[in-house]
Image (spheres, coloured by chain):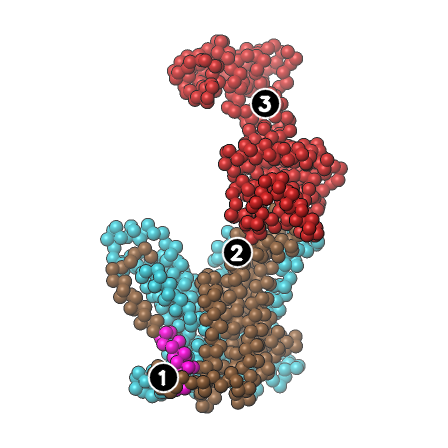
Amino acid sequence: MPLLPQRWRLLLVLLLVIGLPIATGLIWLLLTALFDRVHGLIPQGDFGSENWRFLWQGSVSGRPSIWVALLNSVMFAGAVAVIEVLVSAMAAYAISRMRFPLRSMYLRFALMLHAFPAISLIIAIFYILRILGLFDTLIGVILVKASLELPLGIWLMKGFFDHLSWEMEMAALVDGASRWTLFWRIALPLVRPGILALGTFALLSAWGEFILPFTLIVSGKSWTLALYLQSFMGESFIDFGLMAGVGLFYVLPVVLFFLLGQRYLLNIYSGGAKG
Amino acid sequence: MTGVTVRLEGLVKHFGRVQALKGIDLTLTPGELVAFLGPSGCGKTTTLLLIAGIYKATAGQIFFDDRRIDHLHPRDRDIGMVFQSYALYPHLTMFENIAFPLRLQRVPKAEVKRKVEQTAELLGISEQLLRRPALVSGGQQQRAALARALVKEPRVLLLDEPLSNLDALIRLSARAEIRRLQKELGITSILVTHDQSEALAMADRVAVFSVGEVEQFATPEELYKAPATTFVAGFVGFPPMNLFEGRFNGAFEAKGLKIPLSPGHPGGKGYLGIRPEDIRFDGEIAARVLLVEVLGKDSLLTLEAAGHILKAMSLEGMQVAIGDELLLNFPVEKLHLFDAEGKRIQRQAS
Amino acid sequence: MRRYAAPLLFLLPATILIVLFFLIPVVTTVFLSLTDISTVTFKNPSWVGLQNYRDLLVDPFIPKIFYNTGRYVGLTLLFNVGMGLVLALLTSLIPERHGDNFRTLWLVPRIMPPVVYVFVWQGLLARAPFGIISDLTGINQGWINSSPWTTIILANGFVGASFGMLIFTSAIRAIPRDLFYAAAVDGASTWQTVRRVVLPLLRWPILFVTVYQTLSLLTSFEYILLLTDGGPGLFKTTVWSLHAYKLALSNYFGNIEFGLGAAMATFLVVIGVIVSLVYMRVFNFRELVSEPKIEVN
Ligand SMILES: Nc1ncnc2c1ncn2[C@@H]1O[C@H](COP(=O)(O)OP(=O)(O)OP(=O)(O)O)[C@@H](O)[C@H]1O
Ligand SMILES: [Mg+2]
């Protein structure tokens, strides 16, 4: 707003105060993970490695190795992002740039799904994965996760394709391209900002995903980091230090994605990606 | 010669309720450069895109030589096209832009390099090949677009206002260059423009479009000397021809004006036209000077005669000032007569 | 048909996935709700018509769960929209650079993996020495257990507020500057400008955020599941969607009552479909569907 109230510093302080819990939480996580013992936010013990034993102990009380979970998380997030971006981009390209019957219906339908709360379908999805034989497989959860975010992806990518120049596409056709070639060699490279935005969003969203793997995966060998960390939660004795270590380990890539993709992300979150 | 005959038969194109083309019939001879001239929105680009295969005709047919091509995909028509915005691919270098059509044909690498460099050389953009389009000048972009259209040696070249985004000086040299290349390569070409001087200067023949129709298809000279309709008469030539609406009645009568004609004209309503440069100042039609625009050697006069506003060119050495009274002469052999529909009435043998 | 081969090809993957994981599930949810499918009868369920719905009607815990749901959605919504508005206004009133930083800070809870996020809450609310609240208040207790509702609403709220914040911020940015200058010339104070110029213009965004978040709060249960798992005690913080989930998918009382869970989920699905239909209606659709300028595929 182009009005800077005279006492804006007061507002700044107010913002600091209401934002304090978030900052505190982050600091707490960091300190608890790094020191052997903390009291509140005050480190008591030494700079500790005990909290990080999950990294070299093959297995913490019967759990699969963290490295297996890490690999699964990387595969899960990576595959979801690739599938989500490609499938959305293809559909969005057709909707934005091609003529076919029921085009506008398809568009309406995608918009409707965008508002639809997909998580309410989880019971049926469980059942369907069982029937398809994809229950308790990483590939099954990957497909579900990517699919549930398709409406968002299609909408986002359509917005980007809408801005491509028609003359440029016409030129490519006259130059001898098919629509398929045109898509891969001209259109897709030119909506790079969209791909990065959706890709970053999908990576972050899949990296953090909990309910889907929790519901659709049982065996330890397919655990993702979310399941790994959550498995400590129900225990009668909670080892906060260890969990903080795992949590920090799990969060670090998020920080990286976020810093890299931040400027692409704001659009998506304000487009209503997650309640 | 690579040129083909291009024949358009009864091309009709509707966009929903908009009738963009009402029926176009044209035949281009091999190697010819034809200009499509007309005001904005009259369907020039639409016609080009139908030939290119981007649009599908509502009715009508398109032939290259004697082969019907309107059912073919654009890539199978063997056309080169330059768009008004140039439509270069911004993420590719100039080299890759020009090479794109060849890459799609899976031409061997060495061959691509040779052809691209040769074409770039021809158009004088060899130095810019490694840059992205956004980093070179408008003129160079325009050449790259032309190079991309020419590199695959198309049978037909379509140019949609290729010069309209260039500044005036470059535009003049680009005109000459396109003309030279086109003649050298002998490709049947269509140039869309709404700049009549461009059309008249470059084209072998000009098709003048009014809304969705071709009004006249003729050489520039013919367009000027014998415009087929009042639309063409008013559109071609600068300053435009003076047109009066009235009746033929032995002479031509229009509200307060009576202009003598050579005998033998039919009666009825119609139009009479005379070019400003054909008006002489030794007659009986009284007119008053409203405005004098100096155009260099001579001046353009805006006159008022019996309530009609008309334009005339001053003669060399003539001194005219605003408010002067002149006596105009419309020489009979310079008059253009049109019937009530605006169609030219062929002058009887004189 | 060949004419449409290309768009068909482009749409095929998305269509398959959408049919598989949206359309079929909607039908399946309704279908399952009409059977007695459970752990025992998973392989060959039988048709029971509306029996599951009748069971729900007489279930003594349903009123409690219904009340919980209303409370959860209502209070969280209030926090989300209110805080979203406060944040959007405050961050817009201070210099751009600071505003951006605070908005980024508020995105952190949204971007954190939910499990880590919840773990941090658990830590902060734990007994000393880890729990800060225990330290600060001097009352050493497990705060999640003693105030489960407050925890749930705050934890959800800190994630949800950023949604409203971003939408309202862009709405505020879209307000023509002239309006602010005009207000300033008229001698309006900042507060008056906010009340008389900004808030009225935020009516539609507020409505949008409210509707959108109502729907997602109704159906989401992730944070509750992780924080309290519906407890402590019997159904203390169990909401509709969580109950449906647990009936169908988690070993609560041994036997998984898939059909009953599906019956509960059907309500959510139906609400979802209705709201999406309305959303689609209200949305300004015209400008989104201009005809493609290329007529060949
Ligand atoms: N894709 C389209 N959809 C709908 N109407 C169109 C489309 N393309 C052209 N038109 C309409 O058809 C008519 C002819 O347009 P066209 O672009 O061919 O004109 P033009 O002669 O090239 O004009 P300009 O000199 O402005 O380029 C116009 O009324 C235009 O609005
Ligand atoms: Mg045009």
| Separation (CA) of disc 1 from disc 3 | 95 Å
Please give the name of the residue rendered at 70% of the width and 50% of the height, measured from the top-left corner. Answer: B107
The residue indicated by pointer 1 is: A43
Mark sitting earlier along the chain (1/2): 1
Is A74 located above or below residue A239 in the figure?
A: above
Which chain is rendered cyan in the image? Answer: C
In the rendered image, is residue C232 in sight?
Answer: yes
| Residue C296 percent across, percent down from the top left | 65, 49
Q: Is residue A33 magenta?
A: yes
On the image, the x and y values in percent for residue A167 come to 58, 46
In the rendered image, residues at marks 1 and 2 fall on the same chain:
yes
Q: Colour of chain B?
A: red
Direction front: furthest residue = B127
Q: Is residue B105 above or below residue A238?
A: above
Q: Is residue C251 left or right of residue C88?
A: right
- Pointer 3: what residue? B224
Image quarter where the N terminus of chain B lies is top right
Give the vertical position of B112 relative to C159 (above or below).
above
